[in-house]
Image: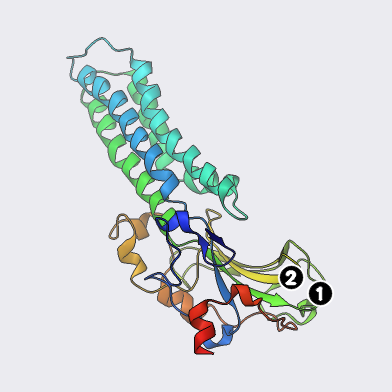
């Protein structure tokens, strides 16, 4: 079962809940906007991450034995290749998840994972072990590879575990008010279109320890036009901006994940998200998209 707003029942074990535990209502300024759930990224990451761990073990164990001068005869570069392959599998899987995401960017995901001090350190370790695979320096370098891999795995798993989503509003006219957009936004279009319409950069320190981006986006479903608000992580992942503080307890590694992945604070998002940047002529939501429980309340 699929629903434009609630998502696919396969994402939730066959059911399609009207509300998930972490989901909260939008602030009053966003009245009329509705959440659209997007495909979760974490489920497609777990199986490759398990294979990545096996590759890491298959590469490191022979190398560690060789560094202690009790090798089993395995080629050094084969072990180094398997070790590097464990990292590459994580990176490519994250990029593949980005391809499957709405407005995902595999390039952004790869840059977010690769442009780090840890990547340089990994390259140095592989070079040192390849140059001199026996001795304490090689042993120490190989042991460091384990926390390096773990930090990469936690980093990716944490950002993929944040509930993906965006908020939509149906519009009745192509002039959605971009000429009078709120301060801080940069327009990319003069009227509604099925593409990014405007952007706003959020510096680090406002919603968390990393910079974010808000994007006003145009899309069409059926015969109705919508504008959507995207909260974009540096990895390119679309984060649901309105989730409860408990989301930090639901990530795979609640104490380490937020630090490694630079995910924002739900409380800070709510505080600094502001009001909608435009005030378009709003169309009525199709009755099929209004949940039954909400229709009963009305």
Whether the residues at callouts 1 and 2 have beta carbons within 8 Å, the answer is yes
Q: Nearer the viewer, residue 72 or 41?
A: 41
Residue 174 marker: 1
Circle 2 sits in a helix, a strand or a loop, which is it? strand
Q: Quadrant of residue 72?
A: top left
Q: Residue furthest top?
A: 73
Residue 264 percent across, percent down from the top left: 44, 66
Instruction: Please give the count of numbered marks on the rendered protein.
Output: 2
Return the residue at label 2: 225
Q: Is residue 13 left or right of residue 74?
A: right
Q: Which badge, 1 or 2, comes first in the chain's sequence?
A: 1
Residue 280 percent across, percent down from the top left: 74, 82
Residue 23 percent across, percent down from the top left: 43, 72
Circle 1 sits in a helix, a strand or a loop, which is it? loop
Q: CA distance from mark 1 to mark 2?
A: 8 Å
Visible residue check, residue 147: yes
What residue sits 31% from the left and 18% below the top?
132
Q: Quadrant of residue 138?
A: top left
């Amino acid at each position: 079962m699929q629903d434009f707003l609630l998502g696919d029942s396969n994402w939730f074990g066959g059911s399609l809940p009207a509300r998930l535990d972490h989901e909260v209502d939008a602030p009053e300024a966003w009245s009329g906007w509705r959440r659209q759930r997007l495909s979760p990224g974490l489920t497609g990451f777990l199986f490759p991450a398990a294979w990545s761990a096996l590759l890491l073990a298959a590469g490191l164990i022979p190398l560690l034995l060789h560094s202690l001068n009790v090798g089993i005869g395995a080629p050094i570069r084969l072990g180094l290749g398997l070790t590097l392959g464990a990292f590459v599998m994580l990176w490519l899987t994250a990029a593949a998840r980005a391809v499957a995401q709405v407005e995902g960017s595999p390039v952004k995901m790869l840059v977010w994972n690769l442009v780090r001090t840890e990547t340089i350190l990994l390259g140095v370790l592989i070079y040192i072990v390849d140059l001199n695979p026996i001795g304490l320096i090689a042993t120490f370098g190989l042991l460091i590879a384990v926390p390096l891999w773990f930090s990469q795995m936690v980093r990716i798993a944490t950002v993929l575990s944040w509930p993906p989503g965006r908020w939509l509003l149906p519009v009745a006219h192509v002039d959605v008010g971009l000429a009078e957009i709120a301060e801080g936004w940069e327009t990319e279009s003069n009227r509604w279109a099925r593409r990014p319409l405007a952007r706003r950069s959020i510096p680090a320190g406002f919603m968390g320890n990393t910079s974010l981006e808000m994007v006003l986006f145009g899309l069409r479903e059926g015969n109705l036009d919508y504008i959507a608000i995207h909260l974009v992580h540096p990895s390119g992942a679309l984060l649901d901006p309105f989730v409860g503080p408990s989301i930090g307890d639901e990530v795979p590694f609640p104490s380490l994940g937020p630090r490694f992945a630079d995910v924002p604070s739900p409380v800070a998002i709510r505080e600094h998200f502001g009001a909608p940047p435009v005030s378009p002529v709003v169309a009525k939501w199709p009755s099929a998209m209004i949940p039954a429980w909400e229709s009963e309340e009305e």
